[in-house]
Amino acid sequence: MKKLFAIVLLCCASTVTFAQSAAPQGVNPQRMQRMEQQLQTRFANANTTHDGKLTRDQAAAGMPRVAQHFDEIDTQKAGYVTLPQIEAFMQQRAAAH
């Protein structure tokens, strides 16, 4: 579980600069960038309405880990989450561990 979370966390770097500064020692910055792109692709594929907002149902269908933590990510209780919210949640969780 910790290993899976670590992999998902690596996906949430929002910029290459952030990825380079936040990457654990020994993690290749190009790998971080690929993982970020992977997260963006998964979000885009799950966001079937293409509005930049992932509903609980969309998350359940395309990003089950996001669905699992949906209420924690949706801090504004808007009924949807955005990619920046997911990234912020992941960064927050990483800082706590």
Image (cartoon, rainbow, N blue to C red):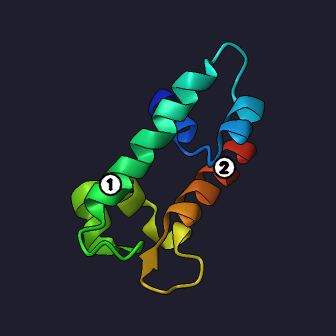
Residue under pointer 2: 91
For mark 2, give the secondary structure.
helix
For the point 28% across and 60% down, the residue is 46
> Can see residue 97?
no
Horizontally, residue 97 falls left or right of residue 63, namely right
Which residue, as the protein is rendered here, is positioned at the far top? 26
Task: Establish if 10 lies above or below 28.
Answer: below
Q: Left or right: where does residue 80 sit relative to residue 23?
A: left
Q: Is residue 35 visible?
A: yes
Q: Amino acid at mark 2?
A: Gln
Residue 42's x, y, as percent?
Answer: 33, 50
Quickly name the residue at label 1. Answer: 63
The amino acid marked with disc number 1 is Met
Return the disc, 2 or 1, that comes first in the chain's sequence: 1
The residue at 49%/27% (across/down) is 3
Q: Secondary structure at mark 1?
A: loop
Where does the N terminus fall, quadrant-wise? top left
Instruction: Indicate the quadrant where residue 66 lies.
Output: bottom left
The crowd level at tag 2 (other Cα within 10 Å; few <14, some 14-19, many 20+) is some
Q: Nearer the viewer, residue 29 or 92?
A: 29
Residue depicted at 52% across the width and 85% down the height: 77
Residue 90's x, y, as percent?
59, 51
| Distance in Å between CA atoms under marks 2 and 1 | 17 Å
Give the total number of marks visible in the rendering: 2
The C terminus, quarter of image? top right
Res 54 → quadrant: bottom left
The numbered mark at residue 78 is none
